[in-house]
Amino acid sequence: MKRIELPSVGESDDPQTQWSDLNLSSPWNELVHIVAPDSNPSDIQIKAIREAKLMTSRRNLIIAGPTNSGKTLLAYMALLRGMVQKGKRVLLLEPLRAIAQEKFDELECVAETMKGTLGRRIGVVVTTGDYRLSEETMQSPPPDGGEIVIATPERLEAIMRNPEFDEWINSFAVVVVDEAHLLSDRTRGGTLEYVITSFKTSKHPPRLVLLSATLGDTEGLEKWLEPCDVAASSLRRPVLKRAIVSVEDEEEWKTCVTASVREILAVPGTSVLMFVYQTKSAEAMARELTGELGELCGAAGALAYHARLSAATKSSIRDTYLGGQSRCVISTTALAMGVNLPATHVVVRDLMQGFGQVGIDTLVQMSGRAGRGKNDGHALFVLKQSDAWKLPELESALLSPQPPTIQSQLVPASDESGWRSRGDHSAPLALAEVLLSLVTRRSESGMTMDEMEEFMSGTLAGSVQRESIGSALTWLANPMQVLAFEAGSIWKPTVLGQTSIQASLDLPIAAGLANLLRDILSIDEDDAILGRMEMIDLLVLTELLAGRPGLPKRFSKEIVGQVDGWFEQADAKSQVFLEWIRGQEGFSKADEVLGSLGMAPAGNGKSGAEKCRQTGYLATLRAIVMWQRAHGIPVADVQRRWKVKDVAEVEESWRDDRLFMLAGMSRIFELRCFYYHLKEECGADDERIHRVKRQLQRMASMARQL
C-alpha cells in the first residue's frame, strides 16, 4: 500500500471583502442573513455580483464555482430579483427530486422569513413528476405575491408537451438551472437541453442562469446562451485535503478501507461519506464497517444510501446521520449530484463504474462533498490494481482537473449514441421525441421541416442535418409506430402520437402497446382474447414494456414452476401469459407478443426465442408481486414466496413509473384509431366495432382502477 498526499485545494482565510462592500440593498441583505448568516462573500459570489452584474443585468449568466462556494445563495438572489421586480414566476430546475424537495423546504423558510420585508407572501411550489402530484394543474397568471416553482427537467419537459400550459410556461421571468453539467448526461442531458432551448427560443425568453461545479470549458455554452456572461472561480473554502491510497494486493484494499475509516472516526466530531459503485456494495460495506468498528460508526451503525431506497428511508437516513446517531454513510453515486449531506471526510472507494473509469468531473463532485461551512474537508481516493485509472494518470487529473466540455446529447455528434433499436427499425429516439413534442404543441397547424430545423438550430449542437430530421420523422411515421404523418409539406401528430406525448409515455411504449392491440384485433376475429383480459394482464404488459425492471431477479427454471403454479391456483388469469408466455423452452410464444410490442431482446432463432421466454416469465413474476402487494400480502411473505429482495424499497419507483404508464395506457385504450383499423384493415361490421369498443373501455377502466 502506498499513500500519495496531494496539494490541498482552497484557502482557509476568510476573504477580505465584506457583504457591505457589495452595496446590496434591501431585501438582498436580509436574504444573505437568512441563507448565509455570519459569512463573508466568497470569490464566486463577488465575481457574480460585481463583474457579472447578477443583480442588475438581464443577460443570461453561467456561474461555475466549486462545491460549497455559495452558488445556492446566488441562485436564490437571481430568482427573488426576477420575481420581485417583474411580479412573475421564477423557476429553479434541480436534477433530482430529493434535491428539489430539499430546496423547497429551504425556500419555504426563506419566503416566510422575508414576508415582512417584502410586504407579501411568496408562493413556493414543487412539481417533480411524483405520482402524488400527477393531477396538479398549471394555473395562470402567477399569484399576486409571486411564485417560485421548483421542478426537475423531466417534469418541465412533460408540461411543455401540452399546449394548454403554454401560458404558464411563458410566465417565467428567470430560470435557474442547478447542476447544469447534467447537459452532458447521455440519458438525461437531452431533456434538459430541450427545456433550455424551448425557453431560449420563446417569444419572450426568461433570463437563464446556469450553475455547476464541473462545467469544464464554457465557451460553447456562452455561445449557445448569447447574450451571456460568465462568473467563474476555482477558489474553494474551506480547504480540501486530498490523498490517493494505491493498493496493489486485491485483497488488501478492504483492510485498507476499514483501517482508514477507523482512523478517521477515532477523532471526535468527524464523519465519513463513502462512495461505492453498486447498491449491493453499499449495503455490504455498511454491514462490514458496523461489524468491524461497532460504536465508532455511531449508535445506528454505518448506513447504506442508494437510489433503490424509498424517499422515506432516505429521509430517515439523512436525519439519523445529521443527528449524530450514525457517523458513516455508504452511498452509490446517487449523492454525488448535490444532495446536502455534510461530512468531514469523503472516501471514494470505487474508481470504476461497470467497465469504465469514473470521470474526473464526477470525482471532483464527490470529493467536494467533504468539508462544509468553515470545517476543512478530507478526500481519500482508493486506487486498486484492477482499476482503469493508473496512478500517474489519476494523480495528474486530480492535480489539474479538466472536466469534459459540455456537448449536446439532444443531437449527438455520433449517430450511434443517439439511436435506439426497435425490432428491425432504428431511429434517433431523442430527436424523434423532440420533433413529436414540437408538432404536438402545434397540432392544429402542424410544422414544416424548415420550422423544425429553425428550432433545432437553437440547440446546443447549433445545427442538425436535414437528413437526421428526416430519419426521425420517417421513424415516427413508420407503420410500426404511426405517431406522426405528413400532409403535403406539413407534419402533424397522429392521435396516438399526440396522446403519447401529452401522457408523457415513452414513444416505444405507446407505439408498442398500440401495435399489440392492432395485431390482436387482426388475428382474433371473435375478440375472445380482449374479452378475457383482466387487471393482471395490464400489469404484465407494463412489466414487458417498462425500460427499468426494478426488482432484481435472475431467470431460473425454478421461476417457471413458481409462476405456472401460481396461475393454476390463483383466481386471477392473465391472457397475455397463458396465450403467449407460458411454456417450456421451445414451446413458448413469448417472441410473438414481444415482437408486437417491439421489445424483443436481441438474438435470432432459438436463442432469441428463449431470451423472449425468459423476459416474459420475469415480467410476469414482477406483475404477480405487484398484484399480491396490491391485495395486501405482507412484504415479508411476498419476498419469502418468490425469493426476492428489496420489495418495499422498489415499490416507490414502481408507483411512479407504473402509475404513469397505466394512466397513459388508459388513454390509449380510448383512442378511436383502433375502430378505423377494425373497419379498414379487418373489415369489421358495426356489431364487432361496438363489441371491441366496450372491451377497450373496460380495459381503460381497469387501468384507472389499478
Image (tube, rainbow, N blue to C red):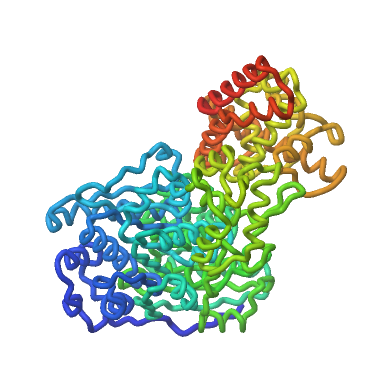
Task: Tell me residue 620's x, y (percent).
Answer: 68, 33
Image position of 339 (left or right of 667): left
Q: Quadrant of the N terminus?
A: bottom right
Q: Nearer the viewer, residue 283 or 13?
A: 13
**x 25%, y 67%: residue:** 36
Residue 209 occupies which quadrant of the picture?
bottom left
Image position of 235 (left or right of 366): left
Above or below, comparing residue 542 to residue 109 in the picture: above
Above or below, comparing residue 515 to residue 238 in the picture: above
- The reply to whether residue 288 is visible in this rendering is no
Above or below, comparing residue 657 to residue 37 in the picture: above
Task: Tell me residue 28's x, y (percent).
Answer: 19, 66
Q: Nearer the viewer, residue 222 or 357?
A: 222
Residue 8 occupies which quadrant of the picture?
bottom left
Q: Nearer the viewer, residue 7 or 500?
A: 500
Residue 40 occupies which quadrant of the picture?
bottom left
